[in-house]
Image: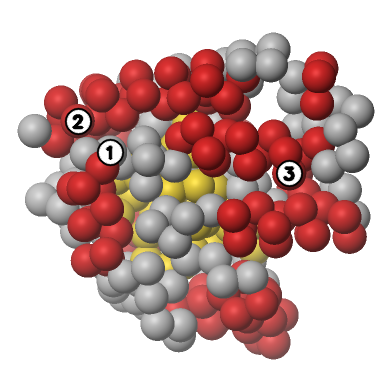
Amino acid sequence: MTRSELIAEINKKQSFLCIGLDTDLSKIPAHLQDHPDAVFEFNKQIIDATHDLCVAYKPNIAFYEMLGSKGWDILGRTLDYIPDSNFTIADAKRGDIGNTSRYYAETFFKAMDFDAVTIAPYMGQDSVEPFLGFSGKWAIVLALTSNTGANDFQMNAYNDGAPLYKDVLRISSRWGSEENMMYVVGATRPEMFKEVRELVPNHFLLVPGVGAQGGSLGEIAKVGMNGDCGLLVNSSRRILYAGDTEDFATVARSEAQKLQEEMKLILS
Protein backbone atom coordinates (compact mmCIF):
# COMPACT_ATOMS: atom_id res chain seq x y z
CA MET A 1 0.00 0.00 0.00
CA THR A 2 1.44 3.37 -0.98
CA ARG A 3 1.47 6.46 1.21
CA SER A 4 -1.27 8.12 -0.84
CA GLU A 5 -3.45 4.99 -0.58
CA LEU A 6 -2.94 4.85 3.19
CA ILE A 7 -3.85 8.52 3.58
CA ALA A 8 -6.95 7.97 1.44
CA GLU A 9 -8.09 5.15 3.77
CA ILE A 10 -7.52 7.34 6.83
CA ASN A 11 -9.66 10.08 5.30
CA LYS A 12 -12.33 7.66 4.11
CA LYS A 13 -12.72 5.88 7.45
CA GLN A 14 -11.96 8.94 9.57
CA SER A 15 -9.68 6.69 11.53
CA PHE A 16 -5.98 6.09 12.11
CA LEU A 17 -6.58 3.03 14.25
CA CYS A 18 -4.35 -0.03 14.01
CA ILE A 19 -5.52 -3.20 15.75
CA GLY A 20 -2.84 -5.54 17.01
CA LEU A 21 -3.74 -9.17 16.39
CA ASP A 22 -1.68 -10.46 19.32
CA THR A 23 -3.91 -13.45 19.73
CA ASP A 24 -3.11 -15.41 22.88
CA LEU A 25 -4.86 -18.78 22.97
CA SER A 26 -5.01 -18.65 26.77
CA LYS A 27 -6.95 -15.35 26.69
CA ILE A 28 -9.58 -15.98 24.04
CA PRO A 29 -13.15 -16.70 25.23
CA ALA A 30 -13.79 -20.09 26.81
CA HIS A 31 -16.32 -21.14 24.17
CA LEU A 32 -13.54 -21.02 21.53
CA GLN A 33 -10.89 -22.84 23.54
CA ASP A 34 -11.86 -26.24 22.15
CA HIS A 35 -12.51 -25.02 18.61
CA PRO A 36 -10.31 -26.97 16.15
CA ASP A 37 -9.12 -23.68 14.63
CA ALA A 38 -9.48 -21.43 17.66
CA VAL A 39 -6.92 -18.70 16.90
CA PHE A 40 -8.01 -18.20 13.32
CA GLU A 41 -11.69 -18.25 14.28
CA PHE A 42 -11.00 -15.58 16.93
CA ASN A 43 -9.06 -13.46 14.41
CA LYS A 44 -11.77 -13.89 11.79
CA GLN A 45 -14.51 -12.66 14.10
CA ILE A 46 -12.40 -9.69 15.27
CA ILE A 47 -11.68 -8.70 11.65
CA ASP A 48 -15.34 -9.08 10.64
CA ALA A 49 -16.35 -6.82 13.54
CA THR A 50 -13.72 -4.10 13.15
CA HIS A 51 -12.34 -3.83 9.60
CA ASP A 52 -14.47 -0.79 8.75
CA LEU A 53 -13.29 1.06 11.87
CA CYS A 54 -9.54 0.61 11.54
CA VAL A 55 -7.06 1.28 8.76
CA ALA A 56 -4.48 -1.33 9.79
CA TYR A 57 -3.95 -4.69 11.45
CA LYS A 58 -0.69 -5.67 13.13
CA PRO A 59 -0.20 -9.36 13.93
CA ASN A 60 2.62 -9.85 16.41
CA ILE A 61 4.58 -12.66 14.80
CA ALA A 62 5.70 -14.18 18.12
CA PHE A 63 2.12 -15.19 18.95
CA TYR A 64 2.07 -17.32 15.79
CA GLU A 65 5.67 -18.59 15.75
CA MET A 66 5.18 -20.18 19.15
CA LEU A 67 2.57 -22.48 17.60
CA GLY A 68 5.12 -23.86 15.14
CA SER A 69 4.16 -24.63 11.55
CA LYS A 70 0.47 -24.46 12.46
CA GLY A 71 1.01 -20.90 13.64
CA TRP A 72 2.54 -19.84 10.33
CA ASP A 73 -0.45 -21.37 8.56
CA ILE A 74 -2.85 -19.41 10.83
CA LEU A 75 -0.88 -16.22 10.21
CA GLY A 76 -1.05 -16.73 6.45
CA ARG A 77 -4.79 -17.38 6.49
CA THR A 78 -5.36 -14.41 8.77
CA LEU A 79 -3.42 -12.17 6.40
CA ASP A 80 -5.44 -13.49 3.44
CA TYR A 81 -8.68 -12.78 5.32
CA ILE A 82 -7.87 -9.14 6.05
CA PRO A 83 -9.51 -6.90 3.40
CA ASP A 84 -7.17 -5.31 0.87
CA SER A 85 -8.25 -1.88 2.09
CA ASN A 86 -6.55 -2.49 5.45
CA PHE A 87 -2.82 -1.85 5.82
CA THR A 88 -1.02 -4.91 7.22
CA ILE A 89 2.00 -4.85 9.51
CA ALA A 90 4.15 -7.84 10.41
CA ASP A 91 5.27 -6.98 13.92
CA ALA A 92 8.39 -9.10 13.63
CA LYS A 93 11.12 -6.75 14.92
CA ARG A 94 13.68 -8.33 12.64
CA GLY A 95 17.20 -6.92 12.49
CA ASP A 96 20.08 -8.67 10.75
CA ILE A 97 22.45 -8.12 7.82
CA GLY A 98 23.25 -9.44 4.36
CA ASN A 99 21.25 -12.31 2.93
CA THR A 100 19.51 -12.87 6.27
CA SER A 101 17.92 -9.43 6.14
CA ARG A 102 17.08 -9.82 2.45
CA TYR A 103 15.38 -13.15 3.09
CA TYR A 104 13.41 -11.69 6.00
CA ALA A 105 12.23 -8.96 3.63
CA GLU A 106 11.26 -11.49 0.96
CA THR A 107 9.46 -13.63 3.56
CA PHE A 108 7.14 -10.86 4.68
CA PHE A 109 6.85 -8.89 1.44
CA LYS A 110 6.86 -11.61 -1.23
CA ALA A 111 5.90 -14.91 0.39
CA MET A 112 3.30 -13.35 2.70
CA ASP A 113 2.56 -9.95 1.09
CA PHE A 114 2.47 -7.80 4.21
CA ASP A 115 2.56 -4.06 3.62
CA ALA A 116 5.10 -3.37 6.35
CA VAL A 117 7.55 -4.99 8.78
CA THR A 118 8.86 -3.68 12.10
CA ILE A 119 12.67 -3.62 12.21
CA ALA A 120 15.26 -3.23 14.96
CA PRO A 121 17.99 -0.88 13.60
CA TYR A 122 20.78 -1.76 16.04
CA MET A 123 22.93 -3.36 13.32
CA GLY A 124 22.73 -0.28 11.13
CA GLN A 125 21.94 0.61 7.55
CA ASP A 126 22.61 -2.79 5.99
CA SER A 127 20.05 -4.36 8.32
CA VAL A 128 17.29 -1.99 7.16
CA GLU A 129 18.10 -1.30 3.52
CA PRO A 130 16.92 -4.69 2.13
CA PHE A 131 13.38 -3.81 3.28
CA LEU A 132 13.36 -0.55 1.32
CA GLY A 133 13.58 -1.97 -2.18
CA PHE A 134 9.98 -3.16 -2.55
CA SER A 135 7.40 -0.94 -4.22
CA GLY A 136 4.49 -0.06 -1.94
CA LYS A 137 6.15 -1.71 1.08
CA TRP A 138 7.37 -0.15 4.31
CA ALA A 139 10.10 -0.57 6.89
CA ILE A 140 8.90 0.47 10.36
CA VAL A 141 11.99 1.23 12.40
CA LEU A 142 11.99 0.99 16.20
CA ALA A 143 12.94 4.44 17.48
CA LEU A 144 11.45 5.21 20.89
CA THR A 145 9.59 2.36 22.52
CA SER A 146 7.16 2.33 25.43
CA ASN A 147 8.69 -0.44 27.53
CA THR A 148 10.59 0.22 30.78
CA GLY A 149 13.79 -1.24 29.34
CA ALA A 150 13.86 1.49 26.68
CA ASN A 151 15.79 3.54 29.23
CA ASP A 152 18.69 1.08 29.12
CA PHE A 153 19.86 2.34 25.71
CA GLN A 154 17.42 4.62 23.91
CA MET A 155 17.59 7.47 26.42
CA ASN A 156 21.35 7.33 26.99
CA ALA A 157 23.44 10.29 25.83
CA TYR A 158 25.37 9.62 22.64
CA ASN A 159 27.82 11.66 20.51
CA ASP A 160 26.65 15.26 20.96
CA GLY A 161 24.92 14.50 24.25
CA ALA A 162 21.55 13.78 22.64
CA PRO A 163 19.78 10.52 23.51
CA LEU A 164 20.41 7.56 21.25
CA TYR A 165 16.87 7.47 19.84
CA LYS A 166 17.48 10.87 18.23
CA ASP A 167 20.49 9.53 16.35
CA VAL A 168 18.40 6.55 15.23
CA LEU A 169 15.85 8.98 13.75
CA ARG A 170 18.38 11.40 12.31
CA ILE A 171 20.64 8.80 10.66
CA SER A 172 18.07 6.24 9.51
CA SER A 173 15.86 8.91 7.89
CA ARG A 174 18.60 9.25 5.24
CA TRP A 175 18.23 5.61 4.19
CA GLY A 176 14.64 5.80 3.00
CA SER A 177 11.90 8.39 2.76
CA GLU A 178 8.45 9.17 4.10
CA GLU A 179 7.17 6.99 1.23
CA ASN A 180 8.69 3.75 2.53
CA MET A 181 9.77 4.24 6.14
CA MET A 182 7.84 4.72 9.37
CA TYR A 183 8.95 4.81 13.00
CA VAL A 184 7.72 3.17 16.17
CA VAL A 185 7.26 5.80 18.88
CA GLY A 186 5.57 4.71 22.11
CA ALA A 187 2.43 6.46 23.32
CA THR A 188 3.64 6.43 26.92
CA ARG A 189 6.20 9.15 26.02
CA PRO A 190 3.98 11.96 24.64
CA GLU A 191 6.29 14.68 25.93
CA MET A 192 8.94 13.52 23.43
CA PHE A 193 6.77 13.58 20.31
CA LYS A 194 7.62 17.24 19.69
CA GLU A 195 11.31 16.34 19.52
CA VAL A 196 10.56 13.34 17.30
CA ARG A 197 8.59 15.53 14.91
CA GLU A 198 11.46 18.01 14.68
CA LEU A 199 13.62 15.22 13.25
CA VAL A 200 11.05 13.35 11.12
CA PRO A 201 8.24 15.83 10.44
CA ASN A 202 6.72 14.00 7.47
CA HIS A 203 7.08 10.33 8.33
CA PHE A 204 4.25 8.19 9.63
CA LEU A 205 4.62 7.03 13.21
CA LEU A 206 3.31 3.70 14.49
CA VAL A 207 2.26 4.38 18.07
CA PRO A 208 1.79 1.46 20.49
CA GLY A 209 0.79 1.91 24.10
CA VAL A 210 -2.69 3.45 23.83
CA GLY A 211 -5.18 1.66 26.07
CA ALA A 212 -3.82 -1.11 28.28
CA GLN A 213 -0.40 0.59 28.59
CA GLY A 214 -1.96 3.92 29.56
CA GLY A 215 -1.15 6.16 26.59
CA SER A 216 -3.55 9.02 25.85
CA LEU A 217 -4.88 9.29 22.30
CA GLY A 218 -5.67 12.98 22.66
CA GLU A 219 -2.21 13.87 23.95
CA ILE A 220 -0.48 11.87 21.22
CA ALA A 221 -2.57 13.39 18.43
CA LYS A 222 -1.94 16.92 19.72
CA VAL A 223 1.84 16.60 19.52
CA GLY A 224 2.30 13.85 16.94
CA MET A 225 0.04 14.54 13.98
CA ASN A 226 1.31 16.16 10.80
CA GLY A 227 -0.49 17.48 7.72
CA ASP A 228 -1.28 13.96 6.47
CA CYS A 229 -2.29 12.70 9.92
CA GLY A 230 1.01 10.83 10.07
CA LEU A 231 -0.09 8.46 12.83
CA LEU A 232 -1.14 4.83 13.10
CA VAL A 233 -2.21 4.35 16.71
CA ASN A 234 -2.21 0.72 17.78
CA SER A 235 -4.52 -0.88 20.31
CA SER A 236 -4.37 -4.59 21.03
CA ARG A 237 -5.57 -5.89 24.40
CA ARG A 238 -8.12 -3.11 24.91
CA ILE A 239 -9.99 -4.32 21.82
CA LEU A 240 -9.15 -8.02 21.53
CA TYR A 241 -10.01 -8.98 25.09
CA ALA A 242 -12.70 -6.42 25.87
CA GLY A 243 -15.21 -9.28 26.07
CA ASP A 244 -14.80 -12.90 27.13
CA THR A 245 -18.17 -14.39 26.23
CA GLU A 246 -19.81 -15.39 22.96
CA ASP A 247 -20.44 -11.73 22.05
CA PHE A 248 -16.72 -10.87 22.33
CA ALA A 249 -16.57 -9.57 18.75
CA THR A 250 -19.48 -7.20 19.36
CA VAL A 251 -17.76 -5.89 22.48
CA ALA A 252 -14.49 -5.56 20.59
CA ARG A 253 -16.28 -3.53 17.93
CA SER A 254 -17.67 -1.24 20.61
CA GLU A 255 -14.17 -0.54 21.95
CA ALA A 256 -12.80 0.01 18.46
CA GLN A 257 -15.69 2.36 17.70
CA LYS A 258 -14.92 4.47 20.77
CA LEU A 259 -11.41 5.02 19.49
CA GLN A 260 -12.57 5.63 15.93
CA GLU A 261 -15.10 8.22 17.06
CA GLU A 262 -12.41 10.03 19.05
CA MET A 263 -10.15 9.90 16.00
CA LYS A 264 -12.93 11.30 13.80
CA LEU A 265 -13.20 14.32 16.08
CA ILE A 266 -9.44 14.78 16.03
CA LEU A 267 -9.33 14.63 12.23
CA SER A 268 -12.23 17.02 11.71
Of badges 3 and 1, nearer the viewer stands 3
Q: What residue type is labelled 3?
A: Phe
* Front one among 131 and 246: 246
Across and down, in percent, residue 110 comes to 60, 80
Pointer 1 residue: 15
Q: Earlier in the sequence, mark 1 or mark 2?
A: 1
Dividing the picture into quarters, in which one does residue 27 lie?
top right
Residue 150 visible somewhere in the drawing = no
Q: Give residue 264's mark.
A: 2
* Front one among 240 and 77: 77
Q: Which of marks 3 and 2 is nearer the N terminus?
A: 3
Q: What residue type is labelled 2?
A: Lys
Across and down, in percent, residue 207 comes to 40, 40
The answer to the question of whether label 1 and label 2 lie on touching residues, with beta carbons closer than 8 A, is yes
Across and down, in percent, residue 139 comes to 46, 67
Specify the color scheme.
secondary structure
Q: SS for tag 2?
A: helix
Using a 10 Å C-alpha cutoff, classify the residue at mark 2 as few (fewer than 14 neighbours), some (14 to 19) or many (20 or more).
Answer: some
Q: Tell me if 66 is positioned left or right of 245 in this view.
A: right
Q: SS for tag 1?
A: loop
Pointer 3 residue: 40
Determine the CA span between mark 3 and mark 2. 30 Å
Dividing the picture into quarters, in which one does residue 192 lie?
top left
Using a 10 Å C-alpha cutoff, classify the residue at mark 3 as few (fewer than 14 neighbours), some (14 to 19) or many (20 or more).
Answer: many
Q: Which of marks 3 and 1 is nearer the N terminus?
A: 1
Q: Give the residue displayed 36% in from the left and 24% down from the top.
A: 257
Pick the quarter of the image with the N terminus. bottom left
Where 257 falls versus 42 (above or below)?
A: above
Determine the CA span between mark 3 and mark 1. 25 Å
Pick the quarter of the image with the C terminus. top left
Across and down, in percent, residue 209 comes to 47, 29
